[in-house]
Image (spheres, rainbow, N blue to C red):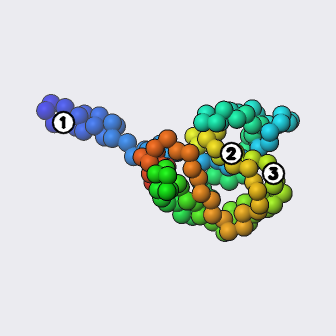
Amino acid sequence: MRQGLCALALVLLAGCATDSEPVRHSLGMHSAQTEAGEGLRQMTDRHSGVQLWVAEQPVLSQNDIEQAEVLVGGDGQAVVLLSLSPSAQALLASITATQIGQPLAILIDGELRMAPIIREPISDGRLALTGFDSLAEANALVDDWSR
């Protein structure tokens, strides 16, 4: 009887121990525009209050990141530097070449967090993201995106 209870306890404990992955933060870079359009959803940047119409599907995601690192800018704010994979570099170069003057919506965990205006093609596959709530937030994102 005692062995049966021990065996049951081990089964129950094994059921409680999971090998599930911790929740990872998502990153999506989406085409966007400043006016309504078909197939676009309206979103508001929580920091600036700017309203954009954003494509549902991201053109790039955290899966396209080859390297991510956190730096602290001269103003003390966190800056996340992203280096993209070669195939993502080519895609980013193409997108930014055709959408000059339009925003590139950066969504983190599905929330519009920043939307820089594309001024010129980005051909080197490197992006600097700013506007994080804290250095700790930036570090947590980089930890997730560097795996």
Give the amino acid at mark 1. Cys
Closer to the chain start, of discs 2 and 3, is: 3
Who's the residue at 76% across and 62% down the image? 121
Q: Are marks 2 and 1 in contact (CB under 8 Å)?
A: no
Give the amino acid at mark 3. Gly
Give the amino acid at mark 2. Ala
Q: Secondary structure at mark 3?
A: loop
Tell me if I can see residue 123 in this picture.
yes
Tell me if I can see residue 142 in this picture.
no
User: Of 27 and 105, which appears nearest the observer?
Assistant: 105
The answer to whether 99 appears left or right of 123 in the picture is right
Q: The N terminus appears in which quarter of the rendering?
A: top left
Residue 6 got which mark?
1
Residue 101 got which mark?
3
Q: How many marks?
A: 3
Q: Secondary structure at mark 1?
A: helix
Who's the residue at 73% across and 33% down the image? 51
Percent position (x, y) of residue 39?
A: 82, 37
